[in-house]
Image (tube, grey):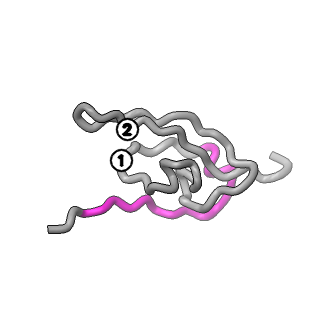
Amino acid sequence: MQKPTLVVPLRPRSGAVCAQTPLPAPYGLTWAQQAGRACVVCGQQLTTGAVSRGWIYGKHGAHRLDVEVWCCPKPEGS
C-alpha cells in the first residue's frame, strides 16, 4: 500500500509575500524546500538573492526534523 504524500500548495511568486508569510510545519516539505533549493512558501526554484527565513523545528519520535528554510528574494525597491 502506498503512503499518502503531502503537497505544499504553490502560490504566485512574489518575494514580498513569501518573505512575510508564516512558516509551515516541517511535515510535507519537498526535498528541494528542505535542501534550500526551493522557496519554502511558493515552491519556486531559488537561484541568487534568496532570503533566509530561519529554522523550522520538528521531530518524529526520536528523529529531529529541524531544517533551515529559504524564500524568494524581495522585489527590488522593497
Q: Alpha-carbon neighbours of circle 1 within 10 Å: few (<14), some, or many (≥20)? A: some
Q: Residue 16 in magenta?
A: yes
- Res 27 label: 1
In the rendered structure, are the residues bearing label 2 and label 1 in contact, judged by CB atoms less than 8 Å apart? Answer: yes
| Residue at x 20%, y 67% (from the top left corner) | 2
Extreme residue in the left direction = 1
User: Residue at label 2?
Assistant: 65
Given residues 69 and 17, the one toward you in this image is: 69
* SS state under label 2: loop
Residues in magenta?
A: 4-20
Q: Residue 6 in magenta?
A: yes
- Res 7 label: none
Above/below status of 69 relative to 75: above
Amino acid found under the numbered disc labelled 1: Tyr
Amino acid found under the numbered disc labelled 2: Leu
Above/below status of 45 relative to 52: below
| Residue at x 51%, y 34% (from the top left corner) | 55
Given residues 63 and 15, the one toward you in this image is: 63
Above/below status of 63 relative to 39: above
| Residue at x 42%, y 35% (from the top left corner) | 66
Q: Which one is closest to the eye, mark 2 or mark 1?
A: 2
Q: Position of residue 39 (x, y in %)?
A: 58, 53
* SS state under label 1: loop
In the displayed structure, does residue 60 sit left or right of residue 46? Answer: left
Q: Alpha-carbon neighbours of circle 2 within 10 Å: few (<14), some, or many (≥20)? A: some
Q: Position of residue 48 (x, y in %)?
A: 74, 53
Instruction: Say whether disc 2 or disc 1 marks the residue closer to the N-terminus.
Output: 1
Q: Main secondary structure of the magenta part?
A: loop
In the displayed structure, does residue 25 sit left or right of residue 38? Answer: left
Q: Position of residue 52 (x, y in %)?
A: 63, 39
Q: Position of residue 26 (x, y in %)?
A: 40, 43
Measure the C-alpha gap from mark 2 to mark 1: 8 Å
